[in-house]
Structure formats: structure tokens, C-alpha cells
Amino acid sequence: MDEKFPTDVSLKAFYDGAKTRSKNGEVDELKWLEIDGLKGVEFRESNPANRMIAGAFSGSLNRKYAGQVQLVNLLLASAGKDFSRHQDAMYGILYSTKIVH
């Protein structure tokens, strides 16, 4: 995307989409995220009733790199039955991520 791409509008759209999913019970945690100085959106999908389906954390943010804006999506997932056991490790991975920008 062009360097002038409105990243704030893009992030707000991601946030609003996840907020709608939250109202529908698909997402049980939603917040603004900052990774390595970049602002983004983080949400956690609700633990599925079917414990074999993956539960996931997702982070979306934009970075300016090599003269353009790039969307970076981070997805960390675990089988639903193991989700709560791996949750702290997944948060640790998400918040210790380094992104070149």
C-alpha cells in the first residue's frame, strides 16, 4: 500500500469488526495493542464449544517499511482443549514479538 495509506482508518475498521464479533460471542477479549512501537488491534476468539477446534489470539497492525505501508497479522492458535493451558505462553510470544520498521 502507498505510504500515504490511512493506517488509523484501517486499524479502526479492524477494531470495529472485532467488536461486532465480540457482540456475537465470537470474541471474548478485544483491545488496542502495541508491539515494538507499532499500534494495532488484538483480539482473542472465544473458547470453542468443540474442544478440537483451535482457539486463537490475533494481532493486526500496520508498519511502514521500504517506502510502503504493510499490514502485519499475527495469529497464535491452540486446540480448544489445550487453549487455556497455552494461553500465557501465547501472550508471551505475542508481546515479545519484534517487527522491523
Image (cartoon, rainbow, N blue to C red):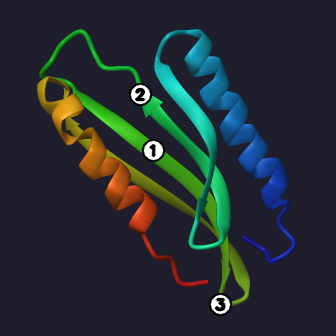
Precedes in sequence: disc 3 or disc 2: 2
Q: Residue at x 48, y 21 (%)?
A: 28
Q: Is residue 98 left or right of residue 80?
A: right
Q: Is residue 55 left or right of residue 82?
A: right
Q: Give me the disc on residue 18.
A: none
Point out the image quarter for the C terminus.
bottom right
Residue assigned mark 2: 45
Mark 3 touches mark 1? (CB < 8 Å)? no
Residue assigned mark 3: 66
Compared to residue 11, the image places residue 62 above or below, namely below
Residue assigned mark 1: 58
Precedes in sequence: disc 2 or disc 1: 2
Q: Residue at x 15, y 17 (%)?
A: 51
Mark 3 vs mark 2: in front: 2
The residues tagged by marks 3 and 1 sit, at their Cα atoms, a distance apart of 25 Å
The amino acid pointed to by label 2 is Glu
Residue 21, percent across and down? 57, 20
Q: Residue at x 42, y 69 (%)?
A: 97
The residues tagged by marks 3 and 2 sit, at their Cα atoms, a distance apart of 32 Å
Mark 2 touches mark 1? (CB < 8 Å)? yes
Q: Is residue 67 left or right of residue 21?
A: right
Compared to residue 41, the image places residue 49 above or below, namely above
Compared to residue 42, the image places residue 36 above or below, namely below
Residue 48, percent across and down? 28, 16
The amino acid pointed to by label 1 is Ser
